[in-house]
Image: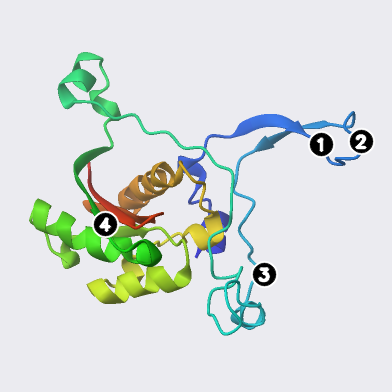
Amino acid sequence: KAAKAQKEGLFDAEIVPVTTRWHPNPEVPEQQEQITVSKDDGIRPTSTPESLAKMKPAFKPDGGSTAGNSSQVSDGAAAALMMRRSTANALGLSSSIIGKWAGTKVTGCKPDEMGIGPAIAIPKLLDYTGISVDEVGIWEINEAFASQAIYCIRKLGIDMEKVNPKGGAIALGHPLGATGGRQLATLLPEMERQGKELGVVSMCIGTGMGMASLIVRE
């Protein structure tokens, strides 16, 4: 999904190109080049089910989580500008409003079950906002691990076609502290592209938490 979306330029609207210095050879620090980073470099378009199946389990000999079906450890930055509508109007930003934050729910689970956080937080969010699973057009559920993401999707009965349509953290990375912003930046342009009104961002959180937010496109 991510490789296809990147090839089609679907991430362009959410990425701010950054020009920086690059040291091609760490052993020769005086050698440097100036490059412009305009796309995520963690996506592996040549991965196949067969190559991923050969990877060793990460946590125990008979485990199912590997480096190939877990989120990358990535550097990243994301930003979102949120304000009251009255403030946006007063600042002349009415035409720049692209979405409305409609609510957030945070919940807890056992620390060693932290990955299932979305399966607990999302029902609380839906109950709070009065909408159903089927009314949500796009779900951005962070893929800390494939196992926990799949569990949450199956537990909630979510249509897999609506989940992470441009790929998730297994391909894009999981930049701690920026993941929620990255998900929101990915969600809103895709909602516009698909013409969807409602989107949900959700993630598990270390030490046993889950979070989910409802976003309305404008």
Q: Earlier in the sequence, mark 1 or mark 3?
A: 1
Give the Cα distance between marks 2 and 4.
48 Å
Number of numbered markers: 4
Q: Residue 32's x, y, as percent? A: 84, 31
Give the Cα distance between marks 2 and 3.
31 Å
Q: Residue 28's x, y, as percent? A: 92, 36
| Along the line of sight, the residue nearer the viewer: 203 or 42 | 203
Q: Residues within 10 Å of mark 2 (few under 14, many from 20)?
A: few
Q: Residue 191's x, y, as percent? A: 31, 51
- Residue at point 54%, 54% (across, down): 173
Toward which corner of the image does residue 121 lie, by quadrant? bottom left
Q: Which residue sits furthest left?
A: 130
Judged by depth in the image, the label closer to the viewer, 3 or 4, is 4
Give the Cα distance between marks 3 and 4.
37 Å
Q: Earlier in the sequence, mark 2 or mark 3?
A: 2
Judged by depth in the image, the label closer to the viewer, 1 or 3, is 1
As helix, strand or loop, the secondary structure at mark 2 comes to loop
Instruction: Say whether residue 46 is left or right of residue 34.
Output: left
Instruction: Say whether residue 126 is left or right of residue 29.
Output: left
Amino acid on which the number 3 mark rests in the picture: Thr
Q: Residue 6's x, y, as percent? A: 55, 55
What residue would you read off at disc 3? 46
- Residue 83, compared with residue 40, is above or below; it is above
Amino acid on which the number 2 mark rests in the picture: Val
Judged by depth in the image, the label closer to the viewer, 4 or 1, is 4
Give the Cα distance between marks 1 and 2.
8 Å
What residue would you read off at disc 4? 108
What residue would you read off at disc 1? 23
Q: State yes or no: discs 1 and 2 in contact (Cβ < 8 Å).
A: yes
